[in-house]
Image (spheres, rainbow, N blue to C red):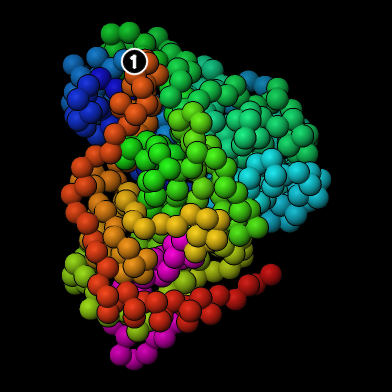
Amino acid sequence: MYLGIDLGTSAVKTVLVDAAQRVVASRSQPLTVASPRPGHSEQDPVQWIDATFATLDALKADHPAELAAVEGIGLSGQMHGATLLDADRNPLRPCILWNDGRSAAECGELEQRWPALRATTGNKAMPGFTAPKLLWVAKHEPEIFAATRLVLLPKAYLRLVLTGEAIEDISDASGTLWLDAARRDWSDAALDATGLSRRQMPRLVEGCAPAAQLSRELAQRWGMRKPPMIAGGAGDNPAGAVGIGAIGSDAAFVSLGTSGALLVPTRAIAANPARAVHTFCHAVPGMWIQAGAILSAASCLAWIARVLRTPEAELLAPLGERPTAPSPVSFLPYLSGERTPHDDPDVRGMLDGLSHGTDRDAIVQAVLEGVAFALADCRDVLADSGMAITAVDAIGGGSRSRSWLSVLANVFDIPVHRFADGETGAAFGAARLGRLAVSGEPVEAVCTAPQRVETFEPDRSLAEAYAERLPKWRSLYRPRR
């Protein structure tokens, strides 16, 4: 048996997977995000531990025999968060999250300090990444920076609590701006540019490699026969790729989670930092991922559901399975700023084209379309980098919506494939990495593609209508800087 634990932004999801790669059980616990100031996004690391322990306690109560047989554990997590620990390895402040925009000024400073940043990391300095956050802390909270002895990403902090060891995997580390993406190792020049050193960094391992064993105390708490091995694991999107077998260079996929992304695994780095394309190491050796990322995807649907005080399922139901025409309303999904292609933490969302005749359905459809248009921006910058995408698989919570995947297929004008359990992709991928860490099996033998349960083909007239709408939608963007 194997466990996959996905430390997301809105919830911790834990899945229990058997040797036949069937999900035996899953549990989740919600998380909350604090915004102490506009543009700031933080979480208390204690939440992560409490939520993770709650999922495992629940699995022990309902599936004690299966949990007792767990041999390997994989961790997946939200990327880029800055968790700063003191000499006793206690958090010094709330974690600054991936969608926090406070460090825009520090991004320019970092690129000036270290001109080789883009060539070494494959990325442009953007506020979501970890390194600029440390420059912000050094400037605005110097006493905390001075006390920082260890900097961890969210799932590495969870691993520290589970094992007592500070270890990070290569894929998550590549989202910090401290990793030499080609060498898959920390860059001393990058760390020096932010006033840090390797002494403050965790040890690095590949995602499918063994990292450390669960502590005996916790293994006893959950009734495990022996302490399982915990794998290196992966950032959420690389873990999602592992979960759907996207480990080769012919497997583009779209993630509709709290944030959104369009991702293409590659066998060589194909960086395009000038257009805000992200370069990450994959969770399997010798592979990388090129990605366009948007900061708000399924969170846009959660936002409109909160504003309208109506459950998401109730909002989606009247839309049916396929739109008949584009909504007369346009929505910019920049609720937390935007990454690809704008790199603009200050831009905000917009509803355009409202009238007395606008109804709820038109607004909800516009929200789905706005996210799809933002992902079309990602598609086009990836194409500029030489990656032509002819079909995509969909994962993340948003992939449950048939109407949303139909919109996406028509906006992209390519087939979009859906899996039966696409929303558990990252946790399932983490479980696969946990298995690889203890079994030594070939990656391709374990990380196979699950069966697609449905394909959404573009409708010619709708695809043409969306292609006509896209330039007008793009014209609504106005930089605030």
The magenta stretch is 352-379
Which residue reaches farthest right? Answer: 113
Q: Main secondary structure of the magenta part?
A: helix
Residue 74 on the magenta span: no
Name the residue beneath numbered marker 1.
Answer: 439
Q: Position of residue 297 (x, y in %)?
A: 41, 59
- Image quadrant of residue 28? top left
Does residue 31 lie above or below 472 as drawn?
above
In the rendered image, the quadrant that contains the C terminus is bottom right
Q: Position of residue 290 (x, y in %)?
A: 51, 48
Does residue 132 lie above or below 304 as drawn?
above
* Residue at image location 42% in from the left, 86% down from the top: 353
Left or right, 242 with respect to 360, comes to: right
Does residue 296 lie above or below 111 as drawn?
below
In the rendered image, the quadrant that contains the N terminus is top left
Residue 445 or residue 322, whichever sits in front:
445
Q: Does any portion of residue 4 appear in the rendered image?
A: no
Q: Does any portion of residue 381 appear in the rendered image?
A: yes
Residue 354 on the magenta span: yes
Left or right, 27 with respect to 112, comes to: left
Q: Position of residue 436 (x, y in %)?
A: 37, 21
* Residue at image location 70% in from the left, 32% down from the top: 187
